[in-house]
Image (tube, rainbow, N blue to C red):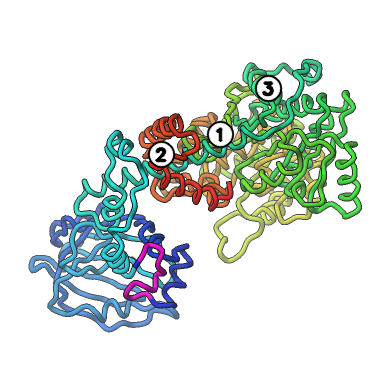
């Protein structure tokens, strides 16, 4: 039996179960061994009913005394009651849809029941606990699963795999690295991550595997960056952009000037620029991007700006046209919903060079889009695009310079993981005329007062947004406000004197544009919308935003939405309406109410949601980390970065024998992510 052997080589795995494992991306024994537990049931101290805790899940040891017959409650749901005792107190256990589990329990036999415990006068109660044989001890692994698998099955097959192939696990790190960073061997780590003998062994295994993940990722990103740096690009001439920056009608901040200088320096090198510009809402990324596009145009090159939505692509086109009009730079837009004749005309103008700057969606990366001389690519809201899309646009020119813009502030550690192949510029200064938005958290009972607020602004000629999480109601969303319903309701009742518009993602692009245009021109005083306004709508006259059911949004998304107001010279307001009773959710919303600093919001969001949900990283085309956690493992990340620098200093291409296994793992990692 080898690590490359199919799972059917293991006892208990037939063709059918192998197909189930394949859904988890596991096709051989080596991949099974690297399918790590998502957590553990701690059986190191199983308790009597008297000593059981109702504050957190625990293991209760008791003997079964009685079983009631399984009975149906409603279609698809059955219930079974089991009584157990520790000879001092009684335990009532309720099982749902667990007929076979209950049948397997023997009266008079002792078991360990693991789950949430509720204390009662005569003992306690548990609902649907995990049933464990009393001889089990230590830490019981719980695995990521799919339908047709249980942790018990995976655990049994993992034991067999380790017995047969544990000795075949190869070391991937050099002896020097293992000794310097006090790491256990790969074989020991794999054994103890699945079946740790004690807590110390588990911590050692975690440290080794997390360190190796960070090391492989850091080295991989360094190699990608090195590969990009060797490409032969277009070295621009260092021409002045002062005339363009003076024409903007406002003074650039020190941060904007610094970032423009960093980009221009990069673009004057034959090594293609790969730079991330991140900054908070309203920090002035568009002006920086425009200055760089002007710089490219002066050097005779075209620029392309890819946005995640047609609404934003259209907004960029309008904004850039105004900026470039005095300099005769033609701006075009290309989106999927345009008529064929319009698309063909724009494509012809791009190919001929008549259009110097083009904005668009993923339509820009289609095969029939050809540029005359593409020198600069800007992707807006990069986390919404896959790495492959960024790469596809890059192939439209001869190693063009690349700028990635993110309006969502990213914690430093996560920025490294998401954008390890890019240099980073931060716009950490807000324009002088920006007044912080005042944010209030209120309950639904105060909704009418919030609407009065909006009505008073309308009388003064100012505008407001009302944001809803849904487009229209259905049976599953009765407690939530729906945009279509709310727009109809307030237009006829609360805001009957106002012109109310509706905007949502299911509308046709032409409809969306008509509504946005009407709002931008103040023909609509109130815009009821879903999160389609999260990016792109720039209406300085909008001074108030009400967000219904604010608890349905992530912190970073709420911060982005709030950024749609406060873009003019007036004091602006954001009112978060939520009836949540959940303490954690309330805490999240209080964070938004207390700070307008996007980086603080992002740090809190990352703590609460984790990096996997923060940007939908699984869709971003980047390697996923199986063990590492961005918030809790920062020290190991720093150690891994230090180790990576040492390795590359002695072996820049990882060609030495001691780094062969590590190099192989890195190549696999990058191939899987198509980086």
Mark 1: which secondary structure? Answer: loop
Looking at the image, is mark 3 or mark 1 nearer the viewer? 3
Residue 316: image quadrant is: top right
Residue 308: image quadrant is: top right
Q: Is 667 or 430 nearer to us in this picture?
A: 667
Instruction: Tell me if mark 1 has few (under 14), some (14-19) or many (20+) residues whose alpha carbon lies within 10 angstroms of its own.
Output: many
Query: Is residue 127 visible from the viewing direction of this image?
Result: no
Please report whichever mark, 3 or 2, sits nearer to the chain's N-terminal start.
Answer: 3
- The numbered dot on residue 260 is 3
| Residue positioned 49% across, 34% down in the render | 652
Instruction: Tell me if mark 3 has few (under 14), some (14-19) or many (20+) residues whose alpha carbon lies within 10 angstroms of its own.
Output: many
Q: Is 433 or 277 nearer to us in this picture?
A: 277
In magenta, the rendered stretch is 2-13
Q: Where in the figure is residue 442, as x and y percent of width and height?
A: 52, 41
| CA gap, disc 2 and disc 1 | 16 Å
Q: Is residue 3 magenta?
A: yes
- The numbered dot on residue 409 is 1
Mark 3: which secondary structure? Answer: helix
Q: Which residue is mark 2?
A: 631
Instruction: Name the image quarter holding the N terminus.
Output: bottom left
| CA gap, disc 3 and disc 1 | 19 Å
Q: Where in the figure is residue 469, as x and y percent of width and height?
A: 60, 51
């Amino acid at each position: 039996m080898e690590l490359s052997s199919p799972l059917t080589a293991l006892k208990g795995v037939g063709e059918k179960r192998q197909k189930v494992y394949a859904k988890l991306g596991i096709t051989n024994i080596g991949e099974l061994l690297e399918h790590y537990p998502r957590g553990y049931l701690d059986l190191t101290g199983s308790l009597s009913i008297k000593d059981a805790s109702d504050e957190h899940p625990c293991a209760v040891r008791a003997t079964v005394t009685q079983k009631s017959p399984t009975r149906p409650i409603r279609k698809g749901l059955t219930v079974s009651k089991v009584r157990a005792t520790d000879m001092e107190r009684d335990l009532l256990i309720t099982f749902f849809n667990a007929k076979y589990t209950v049948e397997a329990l023997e009266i008079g036999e002792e078991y360990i029941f693991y789950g949430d415990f509720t204390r009662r006068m005569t003992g306690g109660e548990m609902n649907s606990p995990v049933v464990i044989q009393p001889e089990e001890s230590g830490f019981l692994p719980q695995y990521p699963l799919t339908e047709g698998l249980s942790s018990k099955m995976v655990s049994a097959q993992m034991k067999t795999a380790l017995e047969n192939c544990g000795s075949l696990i190869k070391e991937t790190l050099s002896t020097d690295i293992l000794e310097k960073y006090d790491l256990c061997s790969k074989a020991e780590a794999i054994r103890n991550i699945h079946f740790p003998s004690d807590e110390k062994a588990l911590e050692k295994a975690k440290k080794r595997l997390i360190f190796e993940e960070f090391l492989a990722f850091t080295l991989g990103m360094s190699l990608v960056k090195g590969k990009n740096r060797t490409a032969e690009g277009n070295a621009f001439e260092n021409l002045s952009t002062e005339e363009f920056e003076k024409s903007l009608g406002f003074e650039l901040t020190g941060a904007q000037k610094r970032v423009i200088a960093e980009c221009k320096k990069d673009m004057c090198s034959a090594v293609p620029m790969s730079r991330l510009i991140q900054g908070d809402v309203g920090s002035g990324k568009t002006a920086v991007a425009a200055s760089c596009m002007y710089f490219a145009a002066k050097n005779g090159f075209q620029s392309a700006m890819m946005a995640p939505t047609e609404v934003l692509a259209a907004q960029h086109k309008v904004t850039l046209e105004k900026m470039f009009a005095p300099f005769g730079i033609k701006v075009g837009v290309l989106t999927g919903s345009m008529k064929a004749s319009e698309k063909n005309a724009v494509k012809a103008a791009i190919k001929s060079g008549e259009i110097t700057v083009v904005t668009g969606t993923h339509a820009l990366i289609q095969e029939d889009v050809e540029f005359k001389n593409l020198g600069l690519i800007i992707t807006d809201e990069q986390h919404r695009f896959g790495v492959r899309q960024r790469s596809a646009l890059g192939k439209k020119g001869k190693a063009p310079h690349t700028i990635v813009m993110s309006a969502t502030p990213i914690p430093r550690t996560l920025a490294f993981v998401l954008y390890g192949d890019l240099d980073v510029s931060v716009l950490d200064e807000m324009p002088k005329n920006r007044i912080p938005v005042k944010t209030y958290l209120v309950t639904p009972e105060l909704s009418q007062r919030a609407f009065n607020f909006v009505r008073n602004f309308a009388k003064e000629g100012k505008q407001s947004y009302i944001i809803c999480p849904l487009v229209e109601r259905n049976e599953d969303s009765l407690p939530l406000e729906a945009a279509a319903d709310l727009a109809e309701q307030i237009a006829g009742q609360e805001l009957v004197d106002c012109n109310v518009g509706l905007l949502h993602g299911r509308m046709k692009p032409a409809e969306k544009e008509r509504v946005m245009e009407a709002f931008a021109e103040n023909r609509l005083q109130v815009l009821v919308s879903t999160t389609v306004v999260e990016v792109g709508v720039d209406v300085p006259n909008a001074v108030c935003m009400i967000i219904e059911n604010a608890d349905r949004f992530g912190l970073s998304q709420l911060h982005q939405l709030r950024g749609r107001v406060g873009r003019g010279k007036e004091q602006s307001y954001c009112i978060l309406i939520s009836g949540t009773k959940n303490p954690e959710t309330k805490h999240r919303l209080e964070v938004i109410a207390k700070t307008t600093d996007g980086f603080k919001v992002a740090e809190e969001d990352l703590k609460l949601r984790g990096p996997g949900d923060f940007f939908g990283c699984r869709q971003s085309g980047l390697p996923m980390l199986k063990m590492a956690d961005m918030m809790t493992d920062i020290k190991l990340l720093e150690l891994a970065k230090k180790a990576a620098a040492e390795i590359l200093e002695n072996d820049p291409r990882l060609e030495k024998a001691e780094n062969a296994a590590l190099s192989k793992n890195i190549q696999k990692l990058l191939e899987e992510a198509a980086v």
